[in-house]
Image: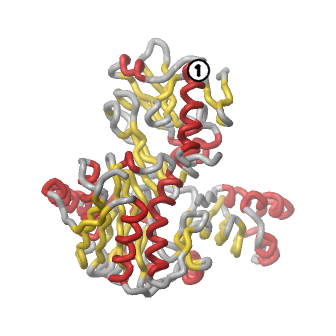
Amino acid sequence: MTEFAEVAGFPVALDRAYDPENHLWVSVSEPATVARIGLDALGVETSGTLAQLAFVGVGEAIKRGEAFGSLEAAKFVGPLTSPLSGRVTSTNEAVVADPRLVESDPYGAGWLIELTLSDPSELDGLVRGAEAVPAWFAAEVADYRLKGVLAE
Amino acid sequence: MVDAHLRVADFGRVTPLRSQTLWHALAYGVSHGGPPTLSFMRPSRPYVGVGYHHRLDEADLDDCREAGLPVYRRMVGGGVVYLDEHQQFFQICLPLSAVPKGRAAAMRRLLEPAVVAFRAVGVEAELDDELEITVGEAKVCGHGAAQIEDAVVVVGNLIERFDHAAAVRVLALPEQVRTEVARLMRRYVTATPADAAAFREAAVAAYAEALGLEAVPGGLSPYERECLSELDRRFSSPEWQRGPARSEPACAQIKVRAGVWVVATAHERATAVASVVGGRIDRAWVSDPDLDGDSSQLEDGLRGITLAEVPAVLGEYGEPGRRLTAAFAKARPVG
């Protein structure tokens, strides 16, 4: 059962790590070989209502910082940037068919892709931990509100 | 402020292909350290543009071929659009770091100067809550946006004259749907015949002011010329034209402007076509063999309700109602 914290009005799952650059969550199986990736609640909020999603093909190798897919909201197309390097083992076709899943259940059924990691040490660059994650997330929300990205 | 200068590149009249590849090349250039750039161009003849995520077969390719219309996929969002020489294109491109992180905030920031430019040439335009540039209820500017590497580009147009018939003809749709799209397009998309040179001048002033930059005329850098050659090849290739793999959609949905849609859907033996305006069904046509040809009462019942209310209305119509409810459940007009 996933444990959540509510941080500045947003749900944040505490059982996973977060990519602070792109507001993606990363859930890693033990041993650390396969990672499931999705958008966190702030990533969903700042994307707007999702209209389209597309992913690279299963079997494709991607490097950290490369796009593993693309997202369209309000006629704005942008890349989904991978926080980790690896080979794509699965893509969530349910969210391609209905991107509303990402908004309604970002930490569960709204996951995006799974990767077999080629460099597990990259996980060290993610934010994790029951104290660090809420603190980081709260600071992000405060920054976004200060900059007018989010309404007060 | 991200740079002291706003490069202003006016390419004038260009081929349909270049009316896409030029500004994509500028985006790659800005991503690689080029200055913020405002660009202008106008296609020399009609063609069809397909939004990045949309299926190529949403365009009526046979009609396009017969009419001699090239079809090019762009990297920005939106659907299948008809473009021609009566549209003055503009694009604003900034480094990603200079753009608000939220998509809505970014779009608003980069479209507001365009509204100032419209108003400067006598068009009483507004940027509405759905991020459409409108006069009254009609959209007057077709816009889209993309992050291309480390640059963000927002594109739009001043529509001096709009060929509604041609715009509808290039859509691959059954006749009934096409007719309804045409009706809504005539109401919700309109031209604003303003002086294009004055609009360009006003846009330069508005974007320079909003971004705190000094406008300086410029052209393509050597890197951007290389990108342009590559983009000319890429955008002409069948692979690019096909776009990302997309499965057959559950139903056809045509966006006329934000909040104005036509959906055509089916389930088992039931079919439905509906226009949805502001989240409510404006008109609907349904069919099901068990309705015995009498669908008018049901269609009247659908008028004015939201898609979420459809099951309650159709619940009293037995099996046809069940099938039509399942058909409407496939519709998902977003934005």
Relative to A108, is A85 on the left or the right?
Answer: left
Vertical position of residue A92 compared to residue B148: above or below: above
Give the x, y percent position of residue B327.
Answer: 67, 59
Relative to B277, is B237 on the left or the right?
Answer: left
Vertical position of residue B42 compared to residue B209: above or below: below
Give the x, y percent position of residue A82.
Answer: 39, 34
Three-letter amino acid code of the residue under disc 1: Asp
Tell me the crowding category of disc 1: few under 14, some 14 to 19, or many 20 or more residues within 10 angstroms, Cα based: some
Res B66 → quadrant? bottom left
Res A9 → quadrant? top right
Give the x, y percent position of residue B166.
Answer: 43, 83
Query: At 52% from the left edge and 54% from the top edge, which residue is drawn?
Result: B105
Give the x, y percent position of residue A10.
Answer: 65, 35
Relative to B264, is B85 on the left or the right?
Answer: left
From this viewpoint, which residue is outermost toward the top? A31
Vertical position of residue A131 compared to residue A57: above or below: above
Vertical position of residue B271 compared to residue A101: above or below: below
Q: Is mark 1 on a helix, strand or loop?
A: loop
What chain is tagged by disc 1? A
Name the residue that disc number 1 marks: A15
Query: At 37% from the left edge and 53% from the top edge, which residue is drawn?
Result: B152
For the C terminus of chain B, which image quadrant? bottom right
Any part of residue B245 in sight: yes
Res A119 → quadrant? top left
Which of B2/A67 is in front? B2
Which of B223/B120 is in front? B120
Relative to B243, is B33 on the left or the right?
Answer: left
Query: At 36% from the left edge and 17% from the top edge, which residue is drawn?
Result: A121
